[in-house]
Image (cartoon, grey):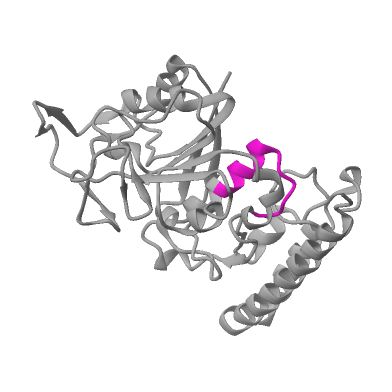
Amino acid sequence: MNRTVPKKRLLIGAKMRYYCRLALTGFRVIRNEGWRSFVKKVRIWRRYRRQTLPYNRAGMYSRDVREDSSRQIISKESLNVFSLQWCYVCGALCEYPPPSDVTNLRETILCPNCGAIERYIDVARVLLEITGSDAPCLSEARRDLHNLKIYLFESYGPVYNVLSRFPHFVCSEFWDDVPVGTKRGNVRCEDVQNLTFPDESFDIVITQDVFEHIADPKKGFKEIHRVLKPGGHYILTVPFDGSLKNSRIRATVKDNKVHHILPPSYHEDKLRRDGVLVFTDFGLDLIPTLEEIGFEVKTFENKRPDYAGGYNIVFACGKH
């Protein structure tokens, strides 16, 4: 099948969204910072706009997408001039809020279209990267991901909304009062430390800020390695502290009782009104732990030091 026409349609929509967002952002700069600042930023943007880079998902499609050898993108630097971000979940352009308005960037809603937070956008970018998809965003990647069996440890959110359209998609949550392997409504209940799936069941497994809440994370990582097919990938995010040589254990479970080593810390959770307990603050030893289990680990970092919580890292773990 000739794929030129769909790509051209994607290109037209992407360029329209880009320039509309750029125009609105320009008006904001003029209003808040004045004409002189606007002209300066336009000059910088035009310099970056003329650059062509290898296709590495730093931005979006440019003029010629007819052949792989001529594919170009708008560079990430040109988006940064106007504090814009490409949403790899839905394909919209996102505008970063002022740093003074942000308390934790990786948990801040950035996309005005799908509601994706920074962390979701990074996960979608990595998923497209490791699967070799040439789609500009996850919502346009159905052709590339159609035959993959994807398991997401989440039953809500923008990434779930897109992946749930795929035919081989599986998701789960964990409830204390539901037997593992059964369902509450349409959602399966699974304990990541004791998964009920057969060996080598999935091509892609995704956990987003799950493992800091697991009492025995190494056991959970081994379970994911077990259910992952050879050649498959595990995409992982956790709150990560690169200043910690060894992960900090905050609590343990013994005889079915939680024993606190440090003062209890809870994260907000849509399914639990009181939040969910943090067991581990992950540090640099996370990568050797994953490699010891058998994963080949690659990291994708997103650094914005001018923001609180402006650092996010996504771990892409391959299974041989």
Residue at the spot x=38%, y=53% of the render? 186
Tell whether 290 sits left or right of 137.
Answer: left
Compared to residue 268, the image places residue 191 above or below, namely above
Task: State the residue in front, 30 or 233.
Answer: 233
Q: Quick check: can you spot residue 285?
A: no
Please provide the residue range marked out in magenta. 124-137
x and y, in percent, of residue 283 in the image: 36, 30
Residue at the spot x=27%, y=39% of the render? 213
Task: State the residue in front, 223 or 265.
Answer: 223
x and y, in percent, of residue 244 in the image: 34, 30
Membership of 131 in magenta stretch: yes
Membership of 115 in magenta stretch: no
Compared to residue 20, the image places residue 182 above or below, namely above
x and y, in percent, of residue 74 in the image: 76, 56
Q: Quadrant of residue 147?
A: top right
x and y, in percent, of residue 285 in the image: 38, 23
Compared to residue 11, the image places residue 131 above or below, namely above
Residue at the spot x=47%, y=51% of the render? 119
